Amino acid sequence: MPGKGESHAHGDEQPVSVVALHRHPFRVTVIGSGNWGTTIAKVVAENTAQHPHLFCKQVSMWVFDEKVGDEMLTEIINTKHQNVKYLPNIDLPTNLVANPDLIDSVRDADILVFNIPHQFLGRIVDQLKGHVKPHVRAISCLKGFEVGRKGVQLLSSYITDELGIQCGALSGANLAPEVAKEHWSETTVAYQLPKDFRGEGYDVDHRVLKVLFHRPYFHVNVIDDVAGISIAGALKNVVALGCGFVEGLGWGNNAAAAIQRVGLGEIIKFGRTFFPECKVETYYQESAGVADLITTCSGGRNVKVAKMMAKTGKDAFEVERDLLNGQSAQGIITCKEVHEWLDTCEMTKEYPLFEAVYQIVYNGVPMKNLPDLIEELDSFVTEDDDLSGSDLSRSDLSRSDIADAAVVDNEGPLVDA
């Protein structure tokens, strides 16, 4: 294990920054301290220490404080330099400072990195209102959507609208424990320069973000397509639940590959339908696209929860509590948000995998019905097929059975903080 602030050699030295800054160094705060939040904070703190002309060395990390044994988590992080609850056995840089006071942690910050379960974003943003200056820039590492009076909204856009600050996104094929152990991987950062951009050397741009997040073990590509990587990052968790179901049923790799194929198609279709500004090539060229889908469907929280659901018969929220040590499987919330939006648009039948995952999680539809729920058989209906005068195809009939299997209220159980 490398020492604090050091990293393994990966045949790629950290690039020397050629960014000339004409202002005081950027001060960075990470909001969130789960395993991914702490991992990203580690990456950022290593880079701020290495590039003092660009960034203030100390990085503040807001921690939802809780007791671990006889000590508070914040105290443990600041004295032992490990997040023993959410990222155990990983040394953290000494310039990463945990702060249990949200407002104090963002004071004088120039760059905010949001990395919390997305269902808690609303309450965090409400607390931050009036405490974040308009010139602050942000990156969202959250996975999900905001569905409300404005329709379906990217979380980065929600942060921009609610706080009045420009916000991009970070997403990629990144399982937190592997990144934390400094196993080589790559990610995508997407950011669009705001209308009030103050100029190169005075404001956050693509080069600044590259230096902030890139490590020899964590390669970063910076692009403009915030919508594309956000959509892929959110919806891959829904697909991962589907993969977990079939793996838990013992159906093997062929079934999991089929789920991923259907899922990728629905991800691209969702993006092109509701966020036409996204670029199709993002889904297959960037780490945030198909690479993230493959990684998430081969491991991670959503697959683990879905597999355990299949093996035990327990509901998603019970498994999440039992299995994840206080963390969240984001696909559980995201599939509900997607269903609600598609239902509003009367388009649930156009996304059979997303709808099937929702119905399994919230309405108790049997997992073994998944192949019938996602299969398109319209082209195979012949004149000899007896549909009793109905113009419904076999696949439509299969999906219509969903309503009969609903056993709980559509709102589903709530998730506690």
Image (cartoon, rainbow, N blue to C red):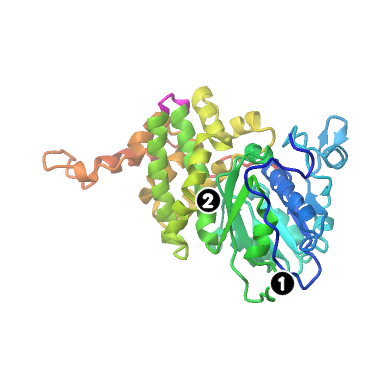
Residue at horizontal 83 percent and vertical 49 percent from the top: 95
| Quarter of the image where the N terminus is located | top right
Q: Nearer the viewer, mark 2 or mark 1?
A: 1
Q: Position of residue 334 (x, y in %)?
A: 54, 47
- Residue 232 in sight here: yes
Please give the range of residues in magenta: 248-252
Q: Tell whether 22 sits left or right of 146.
A: right
How crowded is the residue under tag 1: few (<14 C-alpha within 10 Å), some, or many (20+)? some
Residue placed under numbered mark 1 in the picture: 201
- Work out which quarter of the rendered image holds the C terminus and state it: top right
Circles 2, 1 touching at the beta carbon (< 8 Å)? no
Within-10-Å neighbours for mark 2: few <14, some 14–19, many 20+: many
- Residue 44 lies left or right of residue 144; in this view the side is right
Residue 60, placed above or below residue 91: below
Which label's residue is closer to the chain start, 2 or 1?
Answer: 1
Q: Is residue 198 left or right of residue 253?
A: right
Q: Which mark is residue 213?
A: none
Question: Badge 2 is on which residue?
Answer: 288
Q: Disc 2 residue type?
A: Ala
